[in-house]
Amino acid sequence: MEMLTPLALEVPIISARYARRFVRFMENRGVKRHTILTKTGITDEMLNNPDASLSMTQVLGLLRQADWLMTDERAAFEFGKQLDLPSHGLLGFAMLGQENPRRLVSMIVQYLRVGLPLMDMELESSGTTFRIKLIDTWNVGDLRPCLTKIYMGSIYRLSCQVCGHFTFQFDFSTSTRQEDWQLLAPDCEFVFDASVSQVTMPLKGMPLRKDDASLEFLVARTRHTRKQKTLEADETVMQVRELIMSQPGRPCTTENIARRLDISPRTLRQHLASAGTSFRELRNEIRENFATLYLKDTNVPLESISEKLGFSDQAGFTKAYRSWTGSTPGDIRRQARNKK
């Protein structure tokens, strides 16, 4: 395996929200915050900053400090199960735009690789069965079991609505009974001392519908029916979503998106229309959901949210948000705080 340079380990690449959730998880298990953060280089100020990112060195320091404090070797998998769609932040909601279970699983892998780049993944499919192999690209050594279990837990949480009877294989040992592992994921198998770390899971049905109460604030569905979509149009919608989502605040037009997809603007409009949507509708949908996540889950000032989403001023953002939702950004933030 190619060795990474020390400089690469110091580049901030991982959102501090993951560390914040991990610290909270450990505190709930009786571990003091200052004990977890000792010698990690991570401060409370970083954890409380919604825009902060951590380096690989800081994340590994946090995991190494906590690893010896976790008396239950299932704890890392249990933490992974807490990494649901909301916890993956602004990338997570995009997964809900898929009605195709196959594409949903593919997007889960894609966005975990982008949002939580601690390990790499290889996705294979055969018939209706998916296999996700985990790869240690950072050469994390003794922390590999901990990271592997975190990833497995999150994959399970994100995929269990469309896949069933997971088989988890780990290339390391365990001293915990099979029955105790299965308490974390009923009707699933846990295999240790395997040749590779991977999870195998067959499709069991459709992904979550937009009326699922636990994901109300992440709803980002286009208004079209299954029968109206062609595979080509569906693929185009997914690509346009990804391009807009990668830079929600950057000026983008039908023309430059079409250029990046190597198709004509007319063809792009036709594909989107056949899928029951438009470029403007997709962009507004994504900006609305980004804004709602910022308003509900962070303390980022409205002026900063306006700038992040490409508005020239806060007034323009407020006007647009009211037209999308019927409420002002201030109303949404106050409602979120009152529920806490």
Image (tube, helix red, strand yellow):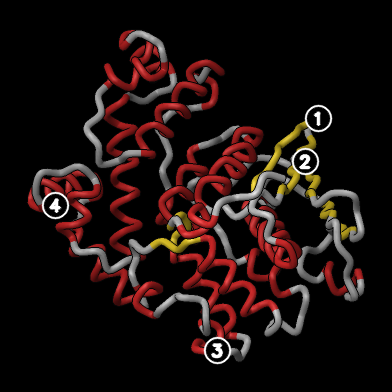
In depth, the one of 169 and 42 nearer the eye is 42
Q: SS class of the residue under badge 3?
A: helix
Q: Quadrant of the C terminus?
A: bottom left
Q: Quadrant of residue 249?
A: top left
Q: Is residue 196 left or right of residue 147?
A: right
Q: Is residue 70 left or right of residue 209?
A: right
Dot 1 or dot 3: first in sequence order is 3
| Residue 146 visible in the current orientation | yes
Q: Residues within 10 Å of mark 1 (few under 14, many from 20)?
A: few
- The disc at residue 318 is 4
Dot 2 or dot 1: first in sequence order is 1
Dot 3 or dot 2: first in sequence order is 3
Dot 3 or dot 4: first in sequence order is 3
Q: CA distance from mark 1 to mark 3?
A: 46 Å
> In front: mark 1 or mark 4?
1
Q: Identify which amino acid the numbered label 1 is placed on.
A: Ser
